[in-house]
Amino acid sequence: MSASIRTIRALVRRALNEIIRVPGGAIPGVLAPAIFLVGLSGVYGAASQLPGFPTGSFRSFIVPVGFLQAATFAGAATGVNLARDIEQGWFDRLIVCPAPRVTLLTGLVLSASLRALLPATALVAVAFALGVHWPGVDGLVIAYALTMGMAAATACWGISMALRFRTQQAAPLIQLAGLLATLFSTAYAPKALLAPWLRHIADVNPANFVMEGVRQGFVGGVTWEHSWQAVVAIAGLLIVLGTFAVRGMRRVGVAA
Amino acid sequence: MPFVARVSLALSRRALVNAMRRPQLLLPLVLIPTLMLAANVGGLNRTTTLPGFPAVHGFLDFQLAPAMTQSLLFGGVAMGVAMALEIEAGFFSRLAVAPIPRVAIVLGRLGAASAIAVIQMLWFLSIGLIFGAHVKSGLPGLLVTFGIGIVAGVAFAALGVALALRARNASTVQGIFPLVFVSLFLSSAYFPRNLLTSPFDAIARYNPLSYIAEGMRDPIVNSLSAQPVLEGLAAAAGLAVLAVGLSVVTLRGRLDEA
């Protein structure tokens, strides 16, 4: 096993240990998507009676919101945890170890992708227990894959912000991006039913393509069109936000 | 001015200045509910056409009250976190041995909470009016909404303070954040009670947040009427009395232990 893979494994294990050893910090993030699923469908369930709504089950329609929350919470947590590591000096020790910085970044990003699986699985368990439409194996695999990709993209954003501000006080800024991306989309209703201003934002919001990609199995069938658009959106986000994160990693210690 | 009032005022001022110096803690109180308000209104504006939805000028009018309630609940958590941080940092221990009435420690924090509640209410009513909301009952209705909101803000802050005094660490207080959403989802704050799905509609009937939100909303969407306003005021005041009592009792228990 190469040194880089061992380093990545160690970083992933460290991040995942936090969930097991500090459950008090992780539980709200794990349960939040399921809470939102139950809460939003209980409150706004009648919205599925609107003409033009693609399914009679608002709960099935709203499931992707939970997947995206799982992804963005996990990615943001990675950024906030890195900011804490920077404040406490652990990151300084990491940065002087003889490992390429891209390897360190990969370990952090991968840990976010894996971390997102936990809230996503809690969400899926609650969703199916409440009778959400079975999306098929392909629909479920796509939903999980897109969630992991979105978590990686959000982690890149969180890492670049943590490296830029070097304090946990940047947490609201880190978390805000995920919230904006999730909410300003077809989260609550299909595009045709959105207010015009929100429809325009959803048109250019890459997270909206991911939302639709995750949703497709839950409200109908998996289609090539929705799948490739979601994959391209994730790839674009990873390229742009990954570039910021790589640049941030390379700049660490240069100014000093 | 009585001694307890002077001390409470001084501690209120201190808590308020501290809060203003940490915009990163204060900003989410209005920012997150504002974003959720925008997304709810933009995404679900057509729900006003659903059979059984009360006649309203627009969904924004209807959604202002839950946004304010959510913001005030966040404010309660923030007050609790601020209190817990002072316990962790040792400032609370210095207050405990100071020759001041103990109740002023709680009242001081709640004074700051009421000032922040005024800012929160002003924010949401301003953006509501800027983006086209109508207050059907005019200025008297605005004042009623304001009044219920401030009393509710004090109640939520007292709950946060009680929790902070009990838990003594900020991360535990911060951990109740998801409960804010749970308690709101289990109320009729976001949607008319008759359109909630079961068992949410039944639970909402017993949730004081339903009455607080409806009490703040009614003057916005209707002409001023006594029942929802009095129910909202009673729910907010009742919760405030209970929560302040709980925080004073918890404070005494905490000081007796020390």
Image (cartoon, rainbow, N blue to C red):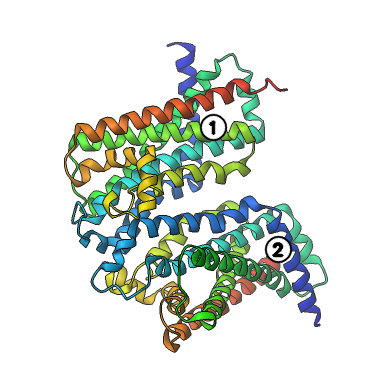
Residue drawn at the location 45% of the way across and 16% of the way down: A5
Viewer-proximal residue, A161 or A189?
A189
In which quarter of the view is residue A221 placed?
A: top left
Residue under label 1: A159
Give the residue drawn at x 42%, y 31%.
A237
Above or below for A176 versus A165: below
Residue type at mark 2 is Leu
- Is residue B19 left or right of B143 when viewed as pictured? right
Q: Position of residue A75 (x, y in %)?
A: 46, 37
Q: Residue furthest top?
A: A2
- The tally of labels here is 2
Q: Nearer the viewer, residue A11 or B146?
A: B146
Query: Does residue B257 lie above or below B42 as drawn?
Result: below
Q: Please give left or right for residue B103 compared with residue A224 in the image.
A: right
Q: Position of residue B186 (x, y in %)?
A: 37, 66
Q: Which residue is mark 2?
A: B16
